[in-house]
Amino acid sequence: MEKQQHFDRVSNQGDVVRKLKEEKASKDEITKAVEMLKKLKVDYKEATGADYKPAATTQAAAGRSNKKGKKEAAKPKQQVKKPSEENKSGVKKQTRLGLEASKSVDLADWYSQVLTKGEMIEYYDVSGCYVLRPWSYSIWEKIVAFFDARIKKMGVKNGYFPIFVSQAALEREKEHIADFAPEVAWVTRSGDTELAEPIAIRPTSETVMYPTYAKWVQSHRDLPIRINQWNNVVRWEFKHPQPFLRTREFLWQEGHSAFATKPEAEEEVMEILNHYGDVYEQLLAIPVVRGKKTEKEKFAGGDYTTTVEAFISASGRAIQAATSHHLGQNFSKMFDISFEDPNKAGEKAFAYQNSWGLTTRSIGVLVMVHGDDKGLVLPPRVADIQVVIVPCGVTANMSDEARQLVGDKCDEYARRLQQIAGVRVKADVRSNYSPGWKFNHWELKGVPIRLEVGPRDIKDSQCKVVIRWSGEKMMVQEQDAPSKVEQLLEKIQADMLARATKDLMDNMVVADKWEDFLKYLDQGKIIQAPFCGDKDAEGIIKKESARDEDLVPGAPSMGAKSLCFPFQPLQQLKSGQKCISGNGKDAIAYCLFGRSY
């Protein structure tokens, strides 16, 4: 089916929904029509690779302009300059290597193009599943190495438990499975034979691991148990899938621990949370807000959940970056992870447990926060190639010896950077691509530093250094190159974090009044507001801050949800402050709200 046919089907169904609402049709009729509209939008995205954008958005803008009596010529749609390369005559020609969408104009299309043209992913024929190409997987490997080293210093060991969960085990913790039930994938058949009992593919591993923990724990001397596993999980999301951010299968680590006492368990919760914060801030150059989830948003079956939340200013939305849960004794009582209480002879005591996880969603956050209209922008600490060296000034009139001299000098720079400074470096000496093409290619892939070497540079014992994230250019003496590049990589890492931190702080505000809350939300900000903590109040806030996308095309449809109670709020609660929901109850703390992925 052609793109236009998909577009027309969504558009027509949108008209149906609007008509039903205008005619005040029954709730069942409207719900059925809206569900069909959502399905058609998913079909559109799967067929085109981009989110559906209603034509009415631009038509409405044109209508408003006409009502004002203005006769201005329509401005052309903002275009992203396509990268160009020079041919032998010096005339620049177009290439489709670069991005054809702008981050500020069409974020969804930009994101899709960055991931595919930047060689991060390949689309797959199962919706919501993606091929992680080496360029993105190398980022995950850096995250794995960083975090794995941290938890091993804590005494955590790695292990592996099966991907399959029996129905009986999965359903033992009722609150837990109730939260995950809609997204559990089930195996029901082997070949042509129906299984006697369906087997679940793990959405998380509490119910996989804890029956085994119960076998291992007979005495308090068997504690603590602290096991982490690096694996994949499946959550069959039916919302709009987005690579890395919301997928049906993803990679992660999940840690599961059991302690004899609550203080030990709670100490680990915060230690893990701080390591997650360091993954984002020290490795990915992304600031996060550390805090505690509300009762409504905490992990199902747990006592409480701590979280690190990131912010993507391009969409005005927050994203849960990683979570560390204290499960209390809920699961240990359910699975009988118990031992004889050393302080009360003959009495049974139950273990205190935690679980904690970080996923490949972190890669999507990295792309969204740092990427620009030229492509990826990678912080040096996670870039698989930190410096690319490109030979320049090589012309068709040069002798083979002169060409070889430039190529050899590039290789020499690469060896020195690697051996002296430990830099991950590549000399791109391919002769079948022009320097301009290589510039665009490596900029698109986000390599932090480009080093250019030409015949004149060799004569002057220098090279040109170009910084990807800022575009800054400088000449560096050949003998100083290793130390200078090493210094620049650290400066780039720090500067990227500083810029992202300023972006977060500029977009995180306090609102004590509902009208300010709505104003800031529609400006794409995240808001700290006084909150009572009630689940019902949270539902009110989300409902009253939502917009009707079907009636107002292009409006941000989702309401604000709670992100966390920040451990370090922007300001302290004053005595007598009431909940932002308007329910009249006293606020207990400032809570961070926002639209969220």
Image: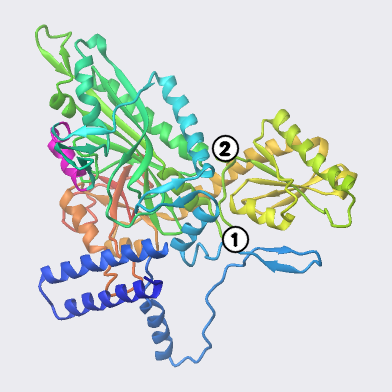
Q: Is residue 587 left or right of residue 140?
A: left
Compared to residue 80, the image places residue 538 above or below, namely: above
Compared to residue 571, the image places residue 418 above or below, namely: above
Q: Is residue 553 left or right of residue 369?
A: left
Q: Residue furthest top?
A: 345
Q: Quick check: can you spot residue 134?
A: yes
Q: Nearer the viewer, mark 1 or mark 2?
A: 1
Quadrant of the image occupied by residue 544 = bottom left
In magenta stretch: residue 188:
no
- Pick whichever of labels 1 and 2 is earlier in the sequence: 1
Task: In the rendered structure, find residue 381 and report the number of the disc placed on it.
Answer: 2
Range of residues picked out in magenta: 169-182
Picture mark count: 2
Q: Give the image location of residue 200, x and y in percent.
A: 21, 38
In magenta stretch: residue 175:
yes
- Residue located beneath label 1 in the image: 98
Compared to residue 417, the image places residue 378 above or below, namely: below
Q: Residue at x 25, y 11 (%)?
A: 222
Q: Residue at x 71, y 45 (%)?
A: 428
Q: Give the image location of residue 361, x and y in percent.
A: 40, 45
Magenta stretch secondary structure, dominant: helix
The N terminus lies in quadrant: bottom left
Q: State the residue in front, 101 or 168.
A: 168
Quadrant of the image occupied by residue 212 = top left
Q: Residue at x 45, y 30 (%)?
A: 147
The three-letter amino acid code for the residue at tag 1 is Gly
Compared to residue 512, the image places residue 321 above or below, namely: above
